[in-house]
Image (tube, grey):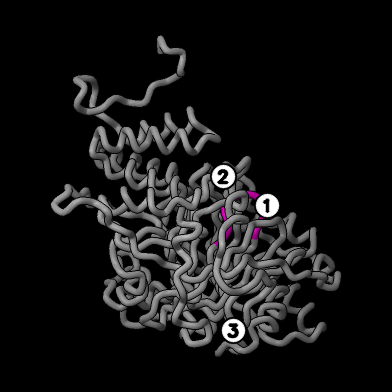
């Protein structure tokens, strides 16, 4: 540290010192160049070429994309086998998006049968109760070993009808999550009234995430009945995201459908805001693309999928295994989701429409390979689904070929319970939104992904 520059990143594996560690290097560079993406990109690129490191090439591409420089990003992304990626505005924080031409369309609070958002979705007492049940030290997180690379969710039944007397009776006999979903159901049904099965909703699947760091993201995915795969590919009627704070990257929703063989022709972004409810067609491809903005606190969200029919799994025992659409267990964390007095829901709903971003058209772009013929390639396991090594439509077509995991087989076998790209990317879009049939890897930051991988490796060594 004689140069006074602070901690140095690990050296090249060719310089005679200790072996190069790209994960450690990234950590050091992010800390040293926090707030200076240009300098960060320069240093990542330098180390990437010095060490032929595909992970650093990927990270360089991510940094350049959030500044709208797709041409520079593609030069390194093509070297690690990337063939397609989301367009730059999907990666860009609001500071840079204002200068980007998104394509035809305008910002709106809703797009028919596709996506809508509302502020002030819940009464303050209800929102506060959910925040308390999901606070950082809440038993819910420790019970599930969170963060985890295993997806888990719960399912509770709902009742139809929206007359006030029936609504009050239903709320009185429900836990907090069921009360919340039942309260929001009339809004969901009214906004998405033209979707098939909207009047046949029987249950709500729910799960939560609390992610932190500058690389918070959630891979592009479909909400699915995982236990029915691959024999049946089923999705919720409507999927929802409830935000508990106003920080972190937006949710990206596309019109790419699990029922179609076409890639998305349009996408929308919804910025987080406390007590904002995002809802969208349950068959739409969606995710959270990291935009490099540091969060002062974890990005806390509650997800709800409204189902007409879904495969359920039993309530888990302490320690798992955990899976999708589980029944509610007899566990301490459940007490924190105890029902509220129905008076908490007496106040009339006073939601206001929230603005969705300008439509992003087109959504996907081929990665331009400018390398010389015969140049060395560095195949890399791409995470997140934001950058792909295959055609975007394969995100849904491969679902029919995906065998269920051993845990899914076990759960399904048991009885279920009710309980500069800124100008260069303006290609025309030949497929209009109305011509496209309407259509999850999990929400995880790069830091947490690396922690999980390290923990898994340590566990393997220990065993």
C-alpha span from label 2 to label 1? 12 Å
> Of helix, strand and loop, which one carries label 2?
loop
Q: Earlier in the sequence, mark 1 or mark 3?
A: 3
Residue drawn at point x = 42 percent, y = 38 percent: 41
Residue drawn at point x = 37 percent, y = 78 percent: 228
Q: Which residue is mark 1?
A: 246
1 and 3 marks in contact (CB < 8 Å): no
> Of helix, strand and loop, which one carries label 3?
loop
Of badges 2 and 1, nearer the viewer stands 2
Q: Is residue 92 left or right of residue 71?
A: right
Locate residue 42, reporting x and y percent: 40, 35
Q: Count residues near mark 3 (Cα–Cα under 10 Å), then give few for <14, some for 14-19, many for 20+.
A: many
Q: Count residues near mark 1 (Cα–Cα under 10 Å), then give few for <14, some for 14-19, many for 20+.
A: some
> Of helix, strand and loop, which one carries label 1?
loop
Point out the stretch of residues depicted in magenta. 243-251
Q: Looking at the image, can residue 332 be seen?
A: no
Q: Which residue is mark 3?
A: 201
């Amino acid at each position: 540290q004689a140069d006074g520059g602070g901690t140095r990143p690990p050296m090249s594996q060719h310089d005679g010192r200790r072996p190069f560690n790209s994960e450690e290097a990234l950590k050091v560079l992010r800390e040293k160049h926090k707030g200076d993406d240009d300098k960060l990109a320069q240093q990542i690129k330098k180390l990437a070429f010095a060490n032929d490191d595909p992970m650093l090439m990927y990270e360089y591409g991510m940094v350049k994309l959030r500044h709208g420089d797709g041409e520079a990003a593609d030069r390194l992304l093509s070297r690690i086998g990337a063939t397609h990626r989301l367009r730059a505005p999907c990666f860009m924080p609001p500071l840079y998006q204002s200068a980007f031409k998104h394509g035809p369309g305008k910002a709106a609070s809703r797009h028919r049968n596709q996506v809508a958002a509302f502020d002030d979705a819940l009464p303050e007492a209800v929102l506060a109760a959910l925040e308390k049940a999901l606070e950082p030290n809440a038993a819910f997180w420790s019970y599930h070993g969170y963060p985890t690379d295993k997806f888990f969710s719960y399912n509770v039944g709902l009742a139809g009808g929206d007359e006030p007397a029936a609504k009050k009776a239903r709320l009185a006999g429900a836990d907090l999550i069921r009360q919340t979903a039942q309260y929001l159901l009339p809004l969901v049904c009214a906004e998405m009234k033209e979707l098939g099965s909207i009047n046949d909703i029987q249950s709500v699947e729910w799960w939560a995430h609390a992610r932190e760091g500058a690389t918070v993201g959630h891979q592009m995915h479909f909400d699915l009945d995982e236990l029915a795969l691959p024999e049946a590919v089923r999705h919720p009627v409507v999927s929802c995201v409830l935000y508990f704070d106003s920080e972190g990257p937006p949710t990206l929703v596309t019109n790419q459908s699990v029922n179609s063989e076409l890639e998305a022709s349009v996408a929308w972004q919804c910025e987080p805001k406390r007590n904002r409810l995002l809802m969208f067609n349950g068959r739409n491809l969606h995710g959270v693309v990291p935009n490099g903005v540091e969060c002062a606190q974890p990005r806390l969200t509650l997800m709800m999928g409204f189902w007409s029919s879904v495969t359920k799994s039993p309530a888990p025992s302490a320690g798992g295994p955990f899976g999708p659409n589980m029944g509610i267990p007899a566990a301490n964390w459940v007490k924190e989701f105890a029902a509220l007095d129905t008076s908490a829901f007496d106040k009339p709903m006073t939601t206001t429409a929230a603005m969705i971003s300008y439509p992003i058209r087109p959504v996907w772009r081929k990665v331009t390979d400018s390398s010389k013929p015969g140049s060395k390639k560095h195949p890399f396991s791409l995470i997140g689904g934001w950058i792909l090594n295959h055609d975007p439509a394969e995100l849904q077509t491969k679902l029919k070929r995906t065998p269920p995991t051993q845990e899914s087989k076990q759960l399904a076998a048991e009885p279920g319970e009710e309980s500069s790209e800124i100008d260069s990317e303006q290609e025309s879009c030949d497929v209009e939104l109305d011509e496209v049939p309407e259509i999850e890897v999990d929400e995880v930051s790069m830091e947490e992904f690396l922690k999980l991988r390290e923990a898994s490796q340590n566990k393997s060594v220990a065993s």
